[in-house]
Image: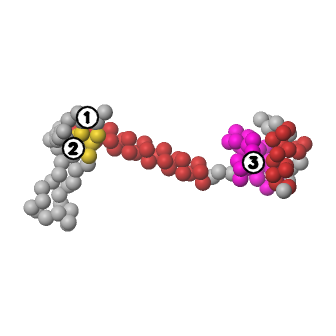
Amino acid sequence: MISLAKGQKRGRKEFSSTVPEIPEQVFIPNRKNPLILPHWSASLLLLQRIRDESHRFALAYHKKLRSKQNIRSSLEDIPGVGEKVCASLLRHFGSVDKVKNASVKELCQVPYLKEKVAEEIYRFFRT
């Protein structure tokens, strides 16, 4: 396992011409000082691409989690109702309002929904 520390590029306004460019540093276990590869090195380019791809993947995953959290249904607050049952309820009835107004008998017609959970849903919206 290694780690790659981003370097700082010169050319920004906060750096003067006397401040040297800080190269990317490769940290390796059991080695005191970091390895500094030349900026034109194919090995460094590969490590940079791996780092950039892992960052892209992590950001995409977190974005997916956040969007999933934002579209969470109030139906999932009912004990016994998970993602699968919630999706089945919404497919069957079309909206949460229609689920709220459904009878226990109507709820029992939904695939994957047991009578005990149907009663729990009915009770949840009536109390």
Q: Amino acid at mark 3?
A: Ile
Q: The residue tagged with tag 2: helix, strand or loop?
A: strand
Q: Residues within 10 Å of mark 1 (few under 14, many from 20)?
A: few
Q: Residues within 10 Å of mark 2 (few under 14, many from 20)?
A: some
Marks 3/2: CA–CA distance = 51 Å
Q: Which residue is mark 1?
A: 29
Q: Amino acid at mark 2?
A: Gln
Q: Amino acid at mark 1?
A: Pro
- Mark with earlier residue (3, 2): 2
- Residue 97, by quadrant, is bottom right
Point out residue 45 in the picture as x, y percentages from the top left corner: 24, 39
Q: Is residue 12 above or below residue 79?
A: below
Image quarter of the N terminus: top left
| Residue 121 seen in the figure | yes
Q: Is residue 40 left or right of residue 58?
A: left
Number of numbered discs present? 3
Point out residue 30 in the picture as x, y percentages from the top left corner: 23, 33
Point out residue 13 in the picture as x, y percentages from the top left corner: 20, 66
Q: The residue tagged with tag 3: helix, strand or loop?
A: loop
Q: Main secondary structure of the magenta part?
A: helix
- Residue sitting at 76 percent across and 53 percent down? 96
Furthest residue toward left? 18
- Residue sitting at 43 percent across and 44 percent down? 58
Q: Is residue 114 left or right of residue 46?
A: right
Indicate which label's residue lies in the foreground, 1 or 3: 1
Q: Is residue 31 left or right of residue 120?
A: left
Indicate which label's residue lies in the foreground, 1 or 2: 1
Q: Which residue is mark 2?
A: 25
- Residue 53, by quadrant, is top left
- Residue range highlighted in magenta: 74-100
- Residue sitting at 20 percent across and 35 percent down? 31
Q: Which residue is mark 3?
A: 78
